[in-house]
Image (cartoon, grey):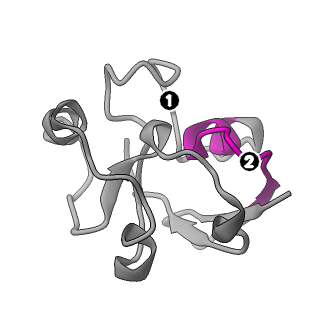
């Protein structure tokens, strides 16, 4: 089972064991990562699961949909090249050990 490491803006790191196929947002929610609010529960109707992925990580992620692009415009935190809505990212085995940054605000 892959482990994801969520790094919050204050430096707190939370490691979560995640079954393959769950979303990164579900992993954060199940791991009680306080920086991922996930108000809409993964319905792609808010931007409160915004996370930062590295340039290398992004090359392994599915492409952003137009709806995800639109929803990211509502994110409270700074948008970066690796900004994604974590509800749209399914966990895969190759993500084991990834450090995912959480913005300072949602």
Identified at 13% across, 40% down, the residue is 73
For the residues labelled 2 and 1, the Cα–Cα distance comes to 19 Å
Identify the image quadrant of residue 31. Answer: top right
Question: Residues at badges 2 and 1 in contact (C-beta under 8 Å)?
Answer: no
What kind of element bears circle 2? loop
Along the line of sight, the residue nearer the viewer: 26 or 13: 26
Identified at 21% across, 59% down, the residue is 78
List the residue tagged with mark 2.
20
Specify whether residue 10 is in view: no
Q: Position of residue 90 (x, y in %)?
A: 56, 45
Q: Quadrant of the C terminus?
A: top left
Identified at 75% across, 36% down, the residue is 30
Q: Position of residue 101 (x, y in %)?
A: 49, 66
Q: Earlier in the sequence, mark 2 or mark 1?
A: 2
What kind of element bears circle 1? loop
Q: Position of residue 46 (x, y in %)?
A: 32, 25
Q: Residue furthest bottom?
A: 56
Q: Quadrant of the N terminus?
A: bottom right
Taking the magenta stretch, the answer to whether it contains residue 54 is no
Q: Residues within 10 Å of mark 2 (few under 14, many from 20)?
A: some
Is residue 83 shown above or below 56? above
Identified at 26% across, 47% down, the residue is 64
Taking the magenta stretch, the answer to whether it contains residue 26 is yes
Is residue 35 shown above or below 9? above
**Circle on res. 16:** none
Give, as a single range, the part of the protein colored magenta: 15-29
Along the line of sight, the residue nearer the viewer: 49 or 10: 49
Judged left or right of residue 12, residue 104 is left
List the residue tagged with mark 1.
38
Identify the image quadrant of residue 96. Answer: bottom right
């Amino acid at each position: 089972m892959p482990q994801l490491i969520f790094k919050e803006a204050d430096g707190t790191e939370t490691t979560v064991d995640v079954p393959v196929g769950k979303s990164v947002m579900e992993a954060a929610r199940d791991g009680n990562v306080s920086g991922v609010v996930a108000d809409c529960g993964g319905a792609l109707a808010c931007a409160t699961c915004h996370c930062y992925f590295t340039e290398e990580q992004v090359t392994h992620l599915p492409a952003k949909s137009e709806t995800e692009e639109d929803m990211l415009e509502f994110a409270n935190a700074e948008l970066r090249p690796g900004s994604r809505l974590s509800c749209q990212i399914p966990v895969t085995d190759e993500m084991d050990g990834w450090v995912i940054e959480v913005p300072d605000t949602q």
